[in-house]
Image (cartoon, rainbow, N blue to C red):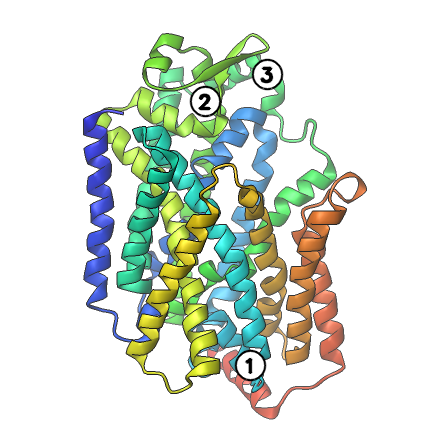
Amino acid sequence: MGLTTLITFIVYLLGMLVIGLIMYRMTNNLSDYVLGGRNLGPGVAALSAGASDMSGWLLLGLPGAIYASGMSEAWMAIGLAVGAYLNWQFVAKRLRIYTEVANNSITIPDFLENRFKDKSHILRVISALVILLFFTFYTSSGMVAGAKLFEASFGLSYDSALWIGTIVVVSYTLLGGFLAVAWTDFFQGILMFLALIVVPIVALNQMGGWSDAVQAVGEIDPSHLNMVQGVGIMAIISSLAWGLGYFGQPHIIVRFMALRSPKDVPKAKFIGTTWMILGLYGSIFTGFVGLAFISTQDVSVLSNLGIQVTTENGLQVLADPEKIFIAFSQILFHPVVAGVLLAAILSAIMSTIDSQLLVSSSAVAEDFYKAIFRKKASGKELVWIGRVATIIIALIAALIAMNPESSVLELVSYAWAGFGAAFGPIILLSLLWKGITRNGALAGILVGAITVIVWGELLSGGLFDLYEIVPGFILNVIVTVIVSLFGSNKPEVVEEFDKTATLMKE
């Protein structure tokens, strides 16, 4: 990697730290640290939600899957696009209003406790435990991905790369809290978007245009052009079902809570949905064009750039398909632009890690420390508890990530399914159904989370080869409804639900 690219990359990292320092001066209490004082504009909220959602999957995972297997891998992108839109449509405005009505709740466990007037704190504690468990491993997997990017791009040792990336992300999250995370995500979202638009356009131009690229891919492997060839109905359902996960992802829906006004939701929905759809298109085209492009390149040129290729069925392909975006950045662009594109990949990884760290630390400060140990803790005290928790959680995640081959990477799909199945139905029913009770919500969260773990460990494969979020989500809904029908809500719970419904109409 050239010096120019390295300098560009370092300038980007320093820029993220500067944002953290600026936002440090604007963070005075836990609401500021966790929700930015509910003062996000629609553009920042939309791109922050998108960037914290997509992670390195959008720039590494999806292009790599399309490169290796063709358009049959695009079903997941369709499910995610639909799920993200429905999340903005049915959850965003209601959650923004309801969290303020329900005693100005600032975290998901806080909202659930206040929504059901749960004086026992058990709903808050169980919710916070689920968040901490899944996010510690989820964060660790992101750190592994970031370390591998540093390692491959700059020739660092894996351990050095891991700790450099960890220190940068923790620093700006620690300093500026939610505002730093939201604004860095905003700029990272723009960078990711531009990268995903520019790279496939330049690559297509090199190939002679879209029709020439399609013809070239078809000549290499006609199955790459077909979305249904070799894909069973269970696989399609599993891929589309990723969209169900959106309703329960704490690091995404907290952006809805942070909007400055419910009236900003339509504009944020348009920005966020447009960003996602165009970004997914760019990601798919990058992988699709990559197969034909790499097959025509000079091996010695690729080798000089550090791009490893192998031969499969007489065809020259990347040794690691997930590096197709990195390969394009090195082959097609000036070193300065290449540095920016590598920063875009790091952005995708960092923007998810920082959000996960923040939600996890807020669970410690608000949902354990304040709720159980120090109910009268000051705002400053809680902010510092959150900062200490950020460091501890990041250290645990980094230690787990010390093994680059760690099986923790396999838990990424568990984490998405776990949050989607545990919280998704509860968030939807809490916002849309007056009859849901505390006991129903508690039973649903436990059943959803346990189903994901049991299904993934014991029942996946063969007849049950279905993404675990599907049975987890369905069983959660069934159990929540049945248990709720045998109970009733306090008058003040019903009153707040009706108040929220009235405000929704205004």
- Kind of residue at disc 3: Asp
Q: Residue at x 54, y 79 (%)?
A: 113
Whole-percent x and y of residue 91? Answer: 52, 65
Question: In what quadrant of the picture does the C terminus appear?
Answer: bottom left
| Label 2 sits on residue | 290
Quadrant housing residue 423? bottom right
The structure residue drawn at horizontal position 54% and vertical position 57%, both measured from the top left corner, is 134
Q: Is residue 499 above or below residue 309?
A: below
Q: Which residue is mark 1?
A: 121
- In depth, the one of 309 and 216 nearer the eye is 309
Q: Earlier in the sequence, mark 2 or mark 3?
A: 3
Q: Is residue 260 visible?
A: no
Which residue is under mark 3?
221
Comparing labels 1 and 2, the label whose residue is closer to the camera? 1
The N terminus is located in which quarter?
top left
- Name the element at disc 2: helix
